[in-house]
Image (cartoon, helix red, strand yellow):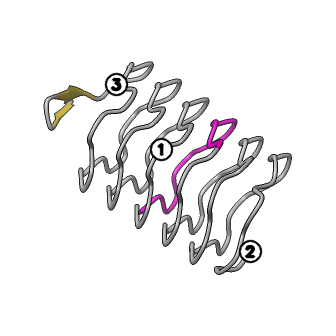
């Protein structure tokens, strides 16, 4: 699958990619490198991001409902206003991630590294 000129596939190497507003519904991006990517407002509902690197990624207002983020690296990611309802974040590294106003109902969180700030939303 190709979105905005980027090849979307497992293991994709897309550091700094501009995928703002992209429709990545059910995308298969396990093990992908999306460090520093701009995913502002992207639709990632149901996407598979198992073991993906999202260090410092901009996921502001992204829809990650039902996404698989198991063991994903979200270090320093901006998740302000993101919809993470029903997402699987087991074993994810959320160190320094900003979850202000994120929607967090029914999120699976066992074994994750906690973010420094988690204002807003509910678990």
31 or 113: nearer the eye? Answer: 113
Q: Earlier in the sequence, mark 1 or mark 3?
A: 3
x then y, percent, for residue 112: 80, 47
In screen coordinates, is 29 left or right of 55? left
The residue wearing badge 2 is 123
- Disc 1 versus disc 2: distance between alpha carbons? 22 Å
The residue wearing badge 1 is 57
x then y, percent, for residue 60: 43, 62
Chain part drawn in magenta: 63-75
Secondary structure mainly formed by the magenta segment: loop
Q: Secondary structure at mark 3?
A: loop
- Disc 3 versus disc 2: distance between alpha carbons? 30 Å
Residue at the limit of the structure toward the left, as seen here: 5
Packing grade of label 2 (10 A; few <14, some 14-19, many >=20) is: few
In screen coordinates, is 61 left or right of 98? left
x then y, percent, for residue 91: 77, 41
* In the rendered image, the vertical position of residue 117 relative to residue 115, given as above or below: below
- Disc 1 versus disc 3: distance between alpha carbons? 18 Å
State the residue at coordinates (65%, 75%): 105
Q: Secondary structure at mark 1?
A: loop
x then y, percent, for residue 1: 21, 30
Name the mark nearer the viewer: 1 or 2.
1
Which disc number belongs to residue 28?
A: none
Is residue 74 rendered magenta in the image?
yes
Packing grade of label 1 (10 A; few <14, some 14-19, many >=20) is: many
Which quadrant of the rendered structure holds the C terminus? bottom right
- Whether the residues at callouts 1 and 2 have beta carbons within 8 Å, the answer is no
121 or 108: nearer the eye? Answer: 121
């Amino acid at each position: 699958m190709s979105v905005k000129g980027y090849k979307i596939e497992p293991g994709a190497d897309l550091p700094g990619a501009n995928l703002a507003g992209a429709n990545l519904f059910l995308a298969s991006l396990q093990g992908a490198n999306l460090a520093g990517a701009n995913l502002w407002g992207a639709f990632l509902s149901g996407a598979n991001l198992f073991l993906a690197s999202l260090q410092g990624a901009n996921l502001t207002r992204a829809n990650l409902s039902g996404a698989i983020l198991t063991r994903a690296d979200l270090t320093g990611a901006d998740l302000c206003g993101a919809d993470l309802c029903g997402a699987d974040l087991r074993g994810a590294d959320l160190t320094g991630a900003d979850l202000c106003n994120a929607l967090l109902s029914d999120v699976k969180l066992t074994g994750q590294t906690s973010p420094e700030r988690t204002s807003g939303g509910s678990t």
